[in-house]
Amino acid sequence: MREELASLNDEALVITQRGRAIAIVITAERWNRPQDDLDELRAQARLNGQRSPRDQFMAWIEEADRRAGRPPSWG
């Protein structure tokens, strides 16, 4: 649990009682992020349904590069 809390950085506040965590308060942005990611993935899935298999694969590679913070894998 400590690792998970550490990954939240400044986006969370741990409320304790007698030295034990009883609640975690997170920012609205952090709370909404999983739903935003899901909405984006659904939109991409709709677009991918209209693409050729090659284009779908290339889009998948581009997305992986983007999420990893890398430049595109090809020029």
Image (spheres, rainbow, N blue to C red):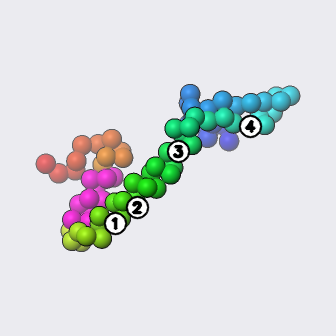
Which of the two labelled residues, at mark 1 and mark 4, occupies the earlier sequence position?
Answer: 4
- The amino acid at mark 3 is Asn
**Percent of width and height locating residue 70:** 29, 42
Q: Is residue 33 left or right of residue 43?
A: right
Do the residues bearing badges 2 and 1 touch, measured as CB atoms within 8 Å? Answer: yes
Instruction: Quickly name the residue at label 4.
Output: 23
In the rendered structure, which amino acid carries the disc numbered 1?
Answer: Arg
- Write the start and end of the magenta stretch as one range: 55-64
Residue matched to label 3: 32
Q: Earlier in the sequence, mark 4 or mark 2?
A: 4
Inter-mark Cα distance, 1 to 3: 21 Å
* Residue 59 position in % (x across, y down): 26, 59
Q: Is residue 57 left or right of residue 68?
A: left
Task: Give residue 28's mark.
Answer: none
Q: Is residue 43 left or right of residue 4?
A: left
Picture quadrant where residue 23 is located: top right
Q: Which residue is mark 1?
A: 46
Q: Residue at x 61, y 36 (%)?
A: 26
